[in-house]
Image (cartoon, grey):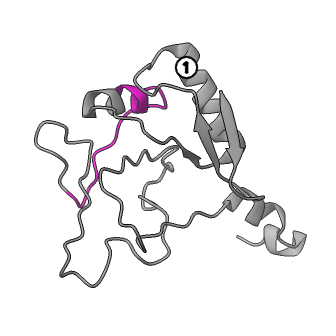
Amino acid sequence: MQVNLLSGALGAEVKGIDLKDSSDKNWEIVNNLMLEHKALFFRDQDITCEEQINLAKKFGPLERHVYVKGLKDHPEILRIVKGAEEKHQWGETWHTDVSYNSKPTKVIILRSRKIPPVGGDTMFSNMEIAYETLDEEIKKKN
């Protein structure tokens, strides 16, 4: 296995793990890497919807989005598509996925089918570091 850090705050590209393998051993490796790096990127993983769901189930109960309908055969999976004529990207402003949940979602698994050669960037932030670096007086406020 090879892990390449992508920045100082978070993110790693992981090579040498097969996401089709949803065994406890493989999940433990992925989970530990996720806890350490916060955002993981696995290239060239041609997984099916079923394989994606099997991996996701290891992190806890699957959710269905309250506002967006999922795929017909896999309602837990949302399809996000931007047409060539569309000017705005779905969720293009700063947000935390499903932040309206009373218990925050542990993991969001994104599977890219088609990536534009330019643009379409998704940025991530490490909120653990953001909190840790706050002034102690600010941390005490509710």
Q: Residue at x 35, y 36 (%)?
A: 62
- The residue beneath circle 1 is 26
Quadrant, the C terminus: bottom right
Q: Residue at x 42, y 28 (%)?
A: 55
Q: Quadrant of residue 101?
A: bottom left
Q: Quadrant of residue 120?
A: bottom left
Q: Is residue 49 above or below residue 98?
A: above
Main SS of residues in magenta: loop
Residue 117: % across, % down: 39, 67
Residue 88: % across, % down: 30, 81
Q: Residue at x 43, y 39 (%)?
A: 44
In the foreground, 69 or 99 = 69
| Secondary structure state at the residue bearing disc 1 | helix
* Stretch of the chain drawn in magenta: 54-68
In the foreground, 116 or 27 = 116
Identified by mark 1, the residue type is: Asn
In the foreground, 30 or 104 = 30
Q: Is residue 89 above or below residue 2?
A: below
- Give the residue furthest to the bottom: 87
Q: Is residue 141 above or below residue 29?
A: below
- Give the residue furthest to the right: 136
Asked whether 69 falls inside the magenta stretch, the response is no
- Give the residue furthest to the left: 72
Left or right of 19? Residue 70 is: left
Q: Residue at x 89, y 69 (%)?
A: 136
Total marks placed = 1
Q: Is residue 76 above or below residue 10?
A: above
Neighbor class of circle 1 (other Cα within 10 Å; few <14, some 14-19, many 20+) is: some
Quadrant, the N terminus: top right
Left or right of 10? Residue 104 is: left
Asked whether 56 falls inside the magenta stretch, the response is yes
